[in-house]
Image (cartoon, rainbow, N blue to C red):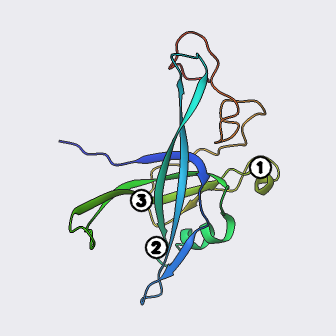
Amino acid sequence: MANLNKVMLIGRLTRDPEMRAFANGGRVANFGFAVNNRKKNQQTGEWEDDPVFLDCEAFNRGDTGKLADNIERFLHKGSQAYLEGHLKLDKWDDKTTGEKRSKLRVVVEVMQLLDPKLMGDGSGPAPQRNSVPARGPVPQRSAPAQGSYYEDAAGDSGPPDEGGGGDIPF
């Protein structure tokens, strides 16, 4: 039986990255990330955002891996980015109640800046990769066109209402 654990997200940071260093010299960036699911309110007929808040972590891996450093340098609260990675389940015992707790976390492997002010010419920087097996090129993502469905994570614009409800707008 095959398994797949892959996450691709476009959204915004909900807090500035927090950095930690390891005894071996490695570093990790921990940050919050939010993406919006869009749904149509059946009563009003209006499109509404249904935000999903995620905890993310990114590591400097290998001799040339600088993903955590680049996240610390270029991303801050409110920054829009494309993230690619996998899910990890953290488990622990709550010290106050003694109950078992768990939380899904996104381990980031690829990051691309999507803020137009940082992208300059609109082509954006190359994705920041760590020592990940080659899977072919990651397509460059340019800044979305003004007024497009993905204009911003706050969701001032929504998909066109063409009666399909779940149709992809591109």
Task: Give neighbour class at mark 1: few <14, some 14-19, many 20+ (Cα, 10 Å).
Answer: some
Tell me the element at label 2: loop
Label pair 2/3, CB-CB below 8 angstroms? no
Q: Which residue is the site of mark 2?
A: 61
Q: Which residue is the site of mark 1?
A: 116
Residue 45, percent across and down? 58, 16
Task: Give neighbour class at mark 2: few <14, some 14-19, many 20+ (Cα, 10 Å).
Answer: some
Label pair 3/1, CB-CB below 8 angstroms? no
- 57 sits to left or right of 125: left
Question: Amino acid type of disc 1?
Answer: Pro
Tell me the element at label 1: helix
Q: Quadrant of residue 66?
A: bottom right
Q: CA distance from mark 2 to mark 3?
A: 13 Å
Question: Residue 133, which numbered label?
Answer: 3
Q: Residue at x 24, y 67 (%)?
A: 97
Q: CA distance from mark 3 to mark 1?
A: 29 Å
